[in-house]
Image (cartoon, rainbow, N blue to C red):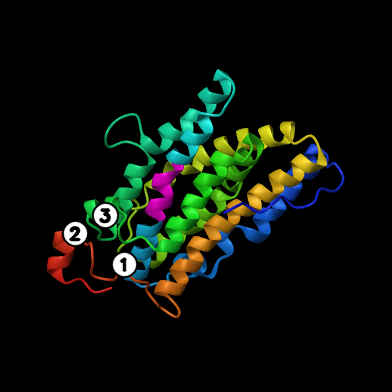
Amino acid sequence: MPLPPAEPAGRLLSPAELEAALRDIGARRYHNLHPFHRLLHDGKLDKDQVRAWALNRYYYQAMIPVKDATLLARLPDASLRRIWRQRIVDHDGDHEGDGGIERWLKLAEGVGFDRDYVLSTKGILAATRFSVEAYVHFVAERSLLEAIASSLTEMFSPTIISERVSGMLKNYDFITRETLAYFDKRLTQAPRDADFALDYVKRHATTPELQAQALDALRFKCSVLWTQLDALYFAYVAPAMVPPDAWRPGEGLRADVAAAGEAA
């Protein structure tokens, strides 16, 4: 299916104006504003709803280095590749048991899941799978400028991480700092990556048309994140209609959790 075209271009923005326009997109469209996240951070979800979030978010985390590898292969010089490949290392790690994906698996195990069940991705919502894979295809098929601009949601991630960690630790007795260890490194990794991507976009979006493409790419990425939460809300909050083959409470839990018959 063809991707939608970028919005029509207007006048050429200064670098400062372009940055302000990008940040305005985050202020209005970033998924910290989604009702599901408000419920998550405010302690208003039950344990199974938190589990559904952890399970589905794993697929996004697992596909980030795949997305970055497609972009890395297209970068034209070694200096850019050296910078971008750090993102893959951050998620995949340098060795077994290291990296962001491993830390997310620990999060999923911490809320009760069996590791192999999470790795299988068989309980993932179809909408999660579709939106994440749409992002991978976007980065592979669009221009380098658009691919890099789409990563700029990382400009806004420190805010949501702070809200998420403090809110979940305060409101859920089954959440510990060890469970949320994934977010510790992201507080430094995300701003580093966002600074590079923002500088790249400001230097390479040199026409109104290119600036419009960069802005549209960030809107697309915000929609990728928002759509995942739409699906979670519909399936597990209201109207709580879990689609066929998606995870249902009680499935895929660690043996000790299942044996204890732990309630949500």
The magenta stretch spans which residues? 57-64
Looking at the figure, which quarter contains the C terminus?
bottom left
Q: Amino acid at mark 2?
A: Arg
- Which residue position is annotated with label 3? 109
- Which residue position is annotated with label 2? 254
Disc 1 vs disc 2: Cβ atoms closer than 8 Å?
no
**Relative to the observer, which residue lies in front, 124 or 225?**
124
Q: Could you tell me which secondary element the residue under label 2 belongs to?
A: loop
Residue at horizontal 71 percent and vertical 50 percent from the top: 6
Distance from disc 1 to disc 2, alpha carbons, whole Å, reads 19 Å
The answer to whether residue 56 is left or right of residue 259 is right
The answer to whether residue 263 is left or right of residue 164 is left
- Image height check: is 35 above or below 225? below
Name the residue furthest front.
Answer: 1
Q: Could you tell me which secondary element the residue under label 3 belongs to?
A: helix
The answer to whether residue 169 is left or right of residue 32 is left
- Where does the image place residue 72, in percent across and percent down from the top left? 51, 30
Residue 43 drawn in magenta: no
Looking at the figure, which quarter contains the N terminus?
bottom right
Residue 178 appears anywhere in the view:
no
Disc 3 vs disc 2: Cβ atoms closer than 8 Å?
yes
The answer to whether residue 168 is left or right of residue 224 is left
Name the residue furthest top.
Answer: 78
Q: Amino acid at mark 1?
A: Asp
State the mark number for residue 245.
Answer: 1
Residue at horizontal 45 percent and vertical 43 percent from the top: 64
Query: How would you rate the neighbour count of disc 3 (Cα within 10 Å): few for under 14, some for 14-19, many for 20 or more?
Result: many
Q: Could you tell me which secondary element the residue under label 1 belongs to?
A: loop
State the mark number for residue 138.
Answer: none
